[in-house]
Amino acid sequence: MLDATIYSHHMFVCGDLNYRIRFGENSVNNKNNNKEGGDTGEEHPDNGSHFDQALKLVEQEKWDELNAGDELAMALKKKECLVGFETLPCNFPPTFKVAREKGYVYNEKRTPSYTDRILWKSTEGMEGTVTPFLYEPCPDFITSDHKPIRGGFRVKMNKGPMKQTIPTSPTINDDRQFHLLVSDIKCTDLPIMDNELMGGLADPYVLFVSSPKGLLFDKAWPSTRVIYRNLNPIWDEDIHLTLNHEACGEGANATSALSLAGNMIYMVVMDYDQTSGDDIIGSVALNLKDLCSQLKFTKSHDGKKKNHLRQSVNFKEAQGIQRTTLSRPILRNGQECGMLECTVVSAYLVPGEVKSFLKIAGKVRSAKFRNAKERILASFR
């Protein structure tokens, strides 16, 4: 259901991406030498001047000026591809198009370019845990008109020093569970998913998916209702999610410490289809560790630590709950497919505290769509 760019904690993309160097251009112009997705062998009209300019910069080792014309860097900056991915600048000679011999002897019919690349992306809440320490070409490779690129990366793991557990260090035998209340959900600028005969719009709903699966899945994934024929849907319903904390355990041992590191909730925006399977519009990743990082714990009268809720209208005065307001791009296959906004209120509760939590959560979350008139007007926006 989820593409690898969303579901993976860390993802690396490497290969011949066929992006070229263009001088004096502010937009990607890859079609000149990339028709129908391949190198046509045709000479660019301005290739002579481009080749001379690029070769001079290579000889002078002015890597910054060469990188300034890099089409991939332009596309990443404009979010035209591989949204959220990072790459390093190429502080070395262009790897294309070269003679099949050691070193860099360039084909004069092509502008020397950085077509061979390595990019990476970390999921929500794990940014900064990948550190590159090597990024260089292999100049002695002689069996292709490209020089391959190699890279080295250090990846900080979820376990060990980075592991974050609930402040009370509970075990999975604890009778408390995580509760999330998701409200004020809305999407904007969704893509058209239906043909003109079906209205030329979309019929969106939001599916809540977890990793690991056992956190949320119980015969089916929770979801909102479908809003028909709308590219800017607003849901006036609240979604209460109870997470199975046994799925957070670090091992099969029932006394394992409860760990949030690496546990994810995905809000998957779907397009309902009456005649075939529903289509994925895109997804937003939520890191459970971030959603619960500010939960407060106090000691009860019997000396045991427990999550304590106070009946308070002011969220800042309420103990044991966390309110998170989100505004994130909806992503699919490395491209943005609209925006998603919502409010998530979280708590870690024993069964008897759930009713109080839902009352408090109802008071601290946004009241933007609580007014009936507001809801009616919003449906026509």
Image: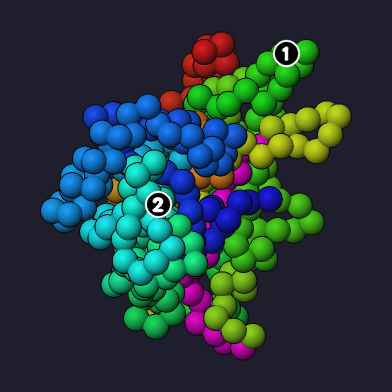
333 shown above or below 305: above
Look at discs 1 and 2 and give the one toward the viewer.
2
Q: Is residue 349 left or right of residue 273?
A: left
Q: Which residue is mark 1?
A: 196
Quadrant position of residue 212: bottom right
Residue at 23%, 41% in the rendered image:
52
Dominant secondary structure of the residues highlighted in magenta in the image: loop
Secondary structure type for disc 1: helix
Crowding at mark 1 (Cα within 10 Å: few <14, some 14-19, many 20+): few
Residue 274 placed where, x, y %? 83, 28
Query: Is 378 in front, or is 13?
Result: 13
Q: Which residues are magenta?
A: 253-270
Q: Which residue is mark 2?
A: 97
Q: Is residue 268 left or right of residue 111?
A: right
Residue 140 placed where, x, y %? 37, 72
177 shown above or below 86: below
